[in-house]
Image (tube, rainbow, N blue to C red):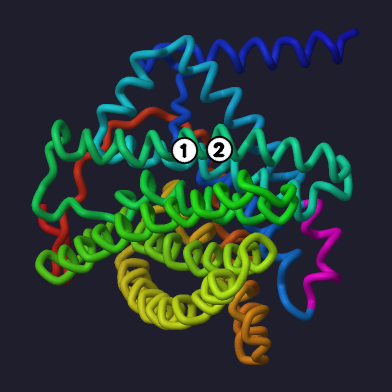
Amino acid sequence: MAADRGSQSRFARLFRVLASTPEGQDSIDIGPNWFASVMGTGVIAISAITLPIIGDSLKDFAIFIWLVATTMFGVVTVAFVFQWIRRPNLIRGHANDPIMAQFYGAPPMAMMTIGNGALLAGSAIIGEAAAYKLAWVLWIIGTIGGLITAIAVPFKLFTQYEVRPDGAFGGWLMPVVPPMVSATAGALLIARMAPGTLRETMLYGCYAMFGLSLIASLIIISLIWSRLAFYGSSGTARVPTLWIVLGPLGQSITAAGLLGTAALATLPPPTSTAMNVFAILYGVPVWGFALLWGALASSLTIRTVRRKLPFALTWWSFVFPVGTLVTGTTQLANHTNLPAFKVAAIALFIALISAWVTVGIRTLHGVFRRNLLAPRAGKPAVAFKGEVPPT
């Protein structure tokens, strides 16, 4: 009985904290950026179980990580929704913040990451039928949410948010990448759909979302490159968001590979053959650019670490984007059967695990100390090229 009363008191305090005003002593702030931790954890499971050569031996590990990610998704969603109901002013503040609003693309991607993991790993626990239904539900909700963010957030960026000339950053990609994740998740669902018009429509719809996200991402990546060239880096916690660029690149390679495979079972040749070949013709050049960007992002990150890089939730940018590059490399390995891509996928996976462990430990430390949970009014990051940030 005493244990039950203790548990009830802890839950009561949790809900009191979530409902408290920003000025409250116990107040915490669960923003949409917290879903990036779910994305980063979920992609570990997907990457592990699909790896060439060693993927089969990592099946139990992938199932465990999927359970962890699913639990995280449930906790963050409950906290986020509860705040949305009890503290609508805080949520409106997130939506009106030109930085935080970009991360509203994270919840849809987190949903679909959990759905993909259910099909690939979770089905061993909940069964194929339940995993298929769960993946469909999360895909539908995530796709609708992702299409909304892809329109609404850029619209507010164009019409409402005040943006500095050096304001372009990796977070601008977050609202437009969800449709690419929808294309990837949709390809996994297509493989389990009955032949017919609906299946073909789904395939072409996924390719449309592939293009929607890809073209928007290329525009934003160009703006980020331009900002770095003209203004430099910020030297702050915004620097890790440069890694988000790998997200649409790696995810698009993954989507092209999975959609090409799905096309072979959905459409007659030569269309299906062309779509499958596109996975290589598109994937290999983009993979090369992804390696270039990874080298640049690494150099800029190391430069900032030497000047003391503060920990923030933006560090999860080191995880999910690299995870998409792992899955993209795996698709290239599957389509080309080249040992080079197989080895590269495993090497990138090792780097992914290292990043996940590091960021995960720092996040838990920040949660226990509550400095990651405290509401804060951030100032716009100022880009610079000198050795010392401007004051």
Viewer-nearest residue: 232 or 129: 129
| Quarter-of-image position of residue 306 | bottom left
The residue lying toward the viewer, choosing from 142 and 172, is: 142
Q: Position of residue 131 (x, y in %)?
A: 78, 42
Of the residues under marks 2 and 1, which one precedes in the sequence? 2
Write down the region rendered in magenta.
54-64
Residue 15 pos. (x, y %): 59, 13
Residue 143 is one of the magenta-drawn residues:
no
Q: How far apart are marks 2 and 1 (CA)?
A: 6 Å
Identify the amino acid type marked 2.
Val
- Classify mark 1: helix, strand or loop: loop
> Residue at (77%, 16%) from the top-left corner?
7
Residue type indicated by callout 1: Leu
Q: Is residue 391 visible?
A: yes
- Residue at image coords 36%, 52%: 212
Q: Does the magenta stretch include residue 59?
A: yes
Tell me the tag on residue 372.
1
Say what secondary structure mark 2 lies in.
Answer: helix
Q: Residue at x 80, y 8 (%)?
A: 5
Mark 1, Cα crowd under 10 Å, few <14 / some 14-19 / many 20+, is many
Residue 241 image offset from top left, x and y in percent: 36, 57
Q: Find residue 265 and report its image quarter.
A: bottom right
Q: Position of residue 369 (x, y in %)?
A: 53, 37
Nearer to the camera, 250 or 58: 250
Q: Can residue 364 be seen in this view?
A: no
Instruction: Give the position of the N terminus as an image quadrant.
Output: top right
Taking depth in this image into account, of 343 and 272 the one nearest to the observer is 272
In this figure, which residue is indicated by the disc labeled 2? 367
As drawn, 206 above or below 91:
below
Label 2: few (<14), some (14–19) or many (≥20) C-alpha neighbours in 10 Å = few
